[in-house]
Image (cartoon, coloured by chain):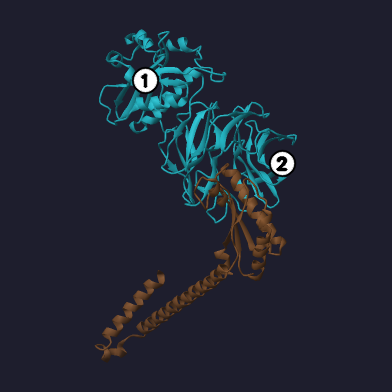
Amino acid sequence: MKFSVVFLMVFMLVCYGCASSPIEYGQKDAVSAADKTRLEQEEALKRKAEEARIAEENLTKARQEKERLLQEKIGTAPLTDIYFDYDSYAIRSDDLSRLKEIGDWLKLNKDIPIILEGHCDERGTIEYNLALGQKRAEVVRNHLANVGVEEKRVKVISYGKEMPADHGHTEEAWAKNRRVHFAFDRQRGVNR
Amino acid sequence: MTRLRLVFILLFLGLAATTVQAKVYLDVYGKSYKKITIAVPGLKSEKADKLRTDMSGLLSQDLDMSGFFIVAPDSLFDRELSNEGIEKQNIQFTNWRSIGVELLCKGRLLEKDGELSLEAYLYDTFEGSTILAKRYRAKPEEWRRMIHRLADDILLAVTGEKGIMGSRVIFVGGGSRNKDVYTASIDGTGVKRVTSFRNITVSPSISPDGRYLAYTSYKEGKPNLFIMDLETGKDVYAERDEGMKLGTAWTGKSTLGYAKTSGKFSTIYTVDPTSGKKKAILTKEGILTSPSFSPDGTKMAFVSDMYGTPQIFIRYLSSGEIKRLTYSGNYNTSPSFSPKGDLIAFVAKVGGSFEICTMSIDGSNQRVLTSGGINDSPQFSPCGRYIIYSSKKGSRYAVYVMLYNGENKRVLKFTNSDEEQPKFVP
């Protein structure tokens, strides 16, 4: 914002200078030393603003590129949701091999920080479900830690029943909602 | 309350003598009671009501919500009854008795110097006696509060205790990922948004001294617990440790009890935002949540899954002794003490639904008060006669209030979106 205003002012001054210079050609020497230094300062300011803009642009580009690469990598990940029984935070035995697979992938892709989101179905109270979601996410983190994924890479957030995957009110919908979802920690991933 | 200049004047000097023995018409704590039929024929006013208010409509609504009255429909009154005067000497009590009206509320509304003045009377049609005679004054725009005052006074005169019609309620309103804290009058008007985070915000509660608001919000990306000073609107305490932090129970003037679930253990803490002093009072493996303190501060009810399913326990704070209160069913949560300390309201899974229940503080006398749906967050009114809660039937959460025995359920409407976790504002 600030830069653009300065930039515009400088630009207008330069235009004014260009337009008037042929007429004032003969009087060039008459331009005072003070005016000259002022113009030079403005030029310098303009250059700086331009440099800053380019640097910013490059940074954004780099960030976008990084994000794209991470996204691409995540696309190859076996990060599917882990489902739970009603009012339970125990991993189902048939999910153990899948957690191992996820753990192995995470170990291969150490640059990817993960958020484990714990979710519940709509049945039960808001408060208890928020605590239950925390437990579900933590139990997945513990299992990943057991297969060698560093705990500090993995953030845990419970959403209780606040963000259902399926808004229905059937057994099927509830089963889909009792889950731990793997999310990519965008902020930590890009800024590292 | 202070803004409203409600002045009441005893119109009859002799009134004190006739009503001082305050005949209790309803023993609300008895096993059963019969509703009283009350008539509220339109309030008389000398000039046409400029505000186009429906004062007798609101009064009827209040009396209906109280759960102690059947409000006689206007269609019962013939012209003679409708046009009758409001003073005792003008009333044909036998005519009212003949249509089954037991109590009769009459009033005259005057507007003078930009102020409303309501002269109200409550008569017992069987004895032909005056139970209540009061004059209320209010600014025209505050007519609703004036009517609520009258309704609460009628309840006081008839049941020996004030009603809840002048109360304010705090709740969470809004849709998915966009929930904020609101307060409103119990009649659904005066809705104020207290927070505007446009994120998930849950479990709001106001300290008994009215100064602090505790809530858990995802406004910083993860669920953190905050205590806001309502005078300044600024957070004065924040708990940002990893894990789920939830607290809606206050004890003493301004001490918040909250539960944190993180890692292998859960802990219940108390914190005083004035001093910032934090104390761990209970740590257990698994889940601990929803602490509620007895009014005398000696006991704490809480939820733990130490035996595999969520159950309610009570802890005697001086001895540290813990007793399990709930044994039936595999899901008992959200305990909340009554203001007299004799009952605990809670949520139990009954069949496929989640019901509001009450029990004695030793776990006996469990009663199921609702039927069907997902009911949540029960809380007693400050007088102890009502329970406010949220209920989900289908896709929508709404706030309800009922008598503590489960009768007279009424839905409260504030905003047009989901409304959850209601509490009375202290």
Q: Secondary structure at mark 1?
A: loop
**Residue A122 point in image, percent of width and height:** 54, 45
Mark before the other along the chain sequence, 2 or 1: 1
The correct choice, above or below, for B354 with respect to B84 in the image is below
Q: Quadrant of residue A125?
A: top right
Q: Residue at x 51, y 26 (%)?
A: B407
Q: Residue at x 42, y 37 (%)?
A: B413
In the image, which disc is placed on residue B307?
2
**Residue B142 point in image, percent of width and height:** 37, 32
Chain of the residue displaying label 2? B
Asked whether residue B5 appears in the rendered view, the answer is: no
Q: Quadrant of the N terminus of chain B?
A: top left
Q: Secondary structure at mark 2?
A: loop
**Residue A132 point in image, percent of width and height:** 62, 48
Chain identifier, colour brown: A
Question: Residue type at mark 1?
Answer: Val
Q: Residue at x 48, y 75 (%)?
A: A61
Same chain letter for marks 2 and 1:
yes
Q: Chain B hue?
A: cyan
Label 1: which residue?
B40
Q: Residues within 10 Å of mark 2 (few under 14, many from 20)?
A: few
| Left or right placement of residue B267 versus residue A20 in this view | right
**In the image shown, does A118 or B383 lie closer to the viewer?**
A118
Report if the CB atoms under discs 2 and 1 are less than 8 Å apart: no
**Residue A103 point in image, percent of width and height:** 66, 64
- Measure the C-alpha gap from mark 2 to mark 1: 55 Å
**In the image shown, does B408 or B45 lie closer to the viewer?**
B408
In the image, which disc is placed on residue A100?
none
Asked whether residue B327 appears in the rendered view, the answer is: yes
Question: Residue type at mark 2?
Answer: Tyr
